[in-house]
Image: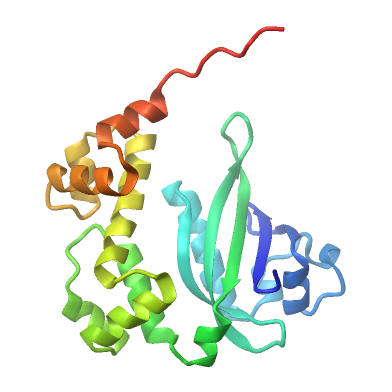
Amino acid sequence: MPDVVFAVKDTDGRYLAISEGCVRRCALRNRLQAEGRTAHELFPGAMADRYRQQDQTLFAERRPLRDRLDLTVYPDGAPGWCLTGKQALRDTDGQLLGLVCISRDLAELTRERLLDARFAACVDHIQAQYHRPLRLEELCDLSGLSTGQLDRRMKRVFSQSVGDFIRRTRMEAASHAIAHSRRPLADIAAGCGFSDQSALTRLCRQMLGLSPRQLRMQVHAPRPAAARD
């Protein structure tokens, strides 16, 4: 899949492995040339700064990053937009080893000029500020788009309306907190932008088919002992 690239980095941002697609984009002769190097040695400065900031956010927040709208370098050397996801890598004891990054080009949307820095800033704002009330007027101002234009653009890029994208972003944060902490559900609801615990419960049931308590119990349920030979 030429429009998808992946990379593995250590906790200092040094590349441990990259895909062939990444080799071509970075004008390298082979994968080995990337080993031990950082994004600042392979990508333009502003791109590398953003990638490094994402890595630090991933490690600090201890939850995966999904659907980050980034500028990257396409195989022909031209800049273009992509959607990026990042997941921390840990050993069997839970110690942090690094991360894996997978990006998918948005070449068609880039050609149609449907993506730009202002729209990306709007998406970033939702993903960073989901814990507080988000007004549609505020998002339109950030993106430079009308209400209808912004909704259509979100559907082209994420296959979701603005409202659905906000709800999904909040639910992802809340479900991670439910599964990986013992915080009271009311605190999680408030910290993830829900009006109250009931709103969190409704969306959790709608999106995951479980209540928050059921989700927590499922994650923390004792695992069956391994079968003996």
Tell me residue 127's x, y (percent).
35, 64
* Quadrant (top left/top right/bottom left/bottom right) for the C terminus: top right
Tell me residue 121's x, y (percent).
37, 78
Tell me residue 214's x, y (percent).
29, 30
* Quadrant (top left/top right/bottom left/bottom right) for the N terminus: bottom right
Q: Is residue 191 above or below residue 82?
A: above
Tell me residue 72's x, y (percent).
59, 78
Q: Residue at x 74, y 71 (%)?
A: 21
**131 displayed left or right of 102:** left
User: Which quarter of the picture shows residue 76?
Assistant: bottom right
**150 displayed left or right of 195:** right
Q: Nearer the viewer, residue 205 or 74?
A: 205
Q: Residue at x 28, y 71 (%)?
A: 162
**218 displayed left or right of 130:** right
User: Which quarter of the picture shows residue 6?
Assistant: bottom right
Q: Is residue 91 above or below residue 202?
A: above
Q: Is residue 56 above or below residue 204?
A: below
Looking at the image, can residue 194 be seen?
Answer: yes
Identity of the residue furthest to the right in this view: 29
Q: Residue at x 62, y 54 (%)?
A: 100
Q: Residue at x 67, y 67 (%)?
A: 5
